[in-house]
Image (cartoon, rainbow, N blue to C red):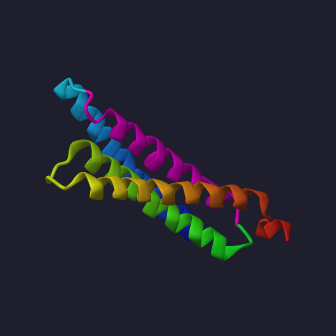
Amino acid sequence: MNGYSKLLLRISAIFALIGAFIGSHMAGAGGPELRTVHAHILAVGWLSLFAWAVYYKVFTPANKTLAALHVYSAIIGSIGLTSGMWLYYTRPFGIGGGFTTVFFIVGGTIMLISFAIFLVLTFLKTEDEV
């Protein structure tokens, strides 16, 4: 599980840098246009993934399949949610509203599933309890 911890930590660091960059850009430009995207990149991408990295460093879930599903759904969901949100609010490439809406919703749904899996993991035994 140490591999999961390191993977989540590295991805969370990427989100932290992106979130800080967006915040810096908004402060310099004087505009709050990206505030929702900025907030979700930091809350979902940086803080949630970081907290889960700590969880996998401290605990070793006995259910390896559920742990793998959690980690990969967390990464895919956080990338999908935040990039979908960015596409939805900024429409940078002239992509139609239907695609961006679905992309945003699917990313958010995967992230929600990840949170649900984590909830289940916290109530299951860990290897030191087996």
In the picture, measured across the screen, residue 119 lies left or right of residue 68, that is right
Asked which quadrant contains residue 121, the reply is bottom right
Query: Per the image, is 74 magenta?
Result: no
> Of residues 10 and 80, which is closer to you in this image?
80
Task: Residue lying at the far left in this picture: please name it.
Answer: 94
Q: Is residue 17 above or below residue 33?
A: below
Asked which quadrant contains residue 35, the reply is top left
Q: Is residue 48 above or below residue 35?
A: below
Picture coordinates of residue 111 (x, y %)? 50, 56
Query: Tag count in the figure?
Result: 0
Q: Give the quarter of the figure containing the N terminus.
A: bottom right
Q: Give the quarter of the figure containing the C terminus.
A: bottom right
In the picture, measured across the screen, residue 58 lies left or right of residue 123, that is left
> Of residues 63 and 113, which is closer to you in this image?
113
Picture coordinates of residue 21 (x, y %)? 27, 40
Task: Residue lying at the far top in this picture: please name it.
Answer: 30
* Magenta region: 32-60
Task: Residue lying at the far right in this picture: please name it.
Answer: 130
Q: Main secondary structure of the magenta part?
A: helix
Picture coordinates of residue 42 (x, y %)? 42, 42
Asked which quadrant contains residue 107, the reply is bottom left
Q: Is residue 86 visible?
A: yes
Q: Is residue 6 visible?
A: no
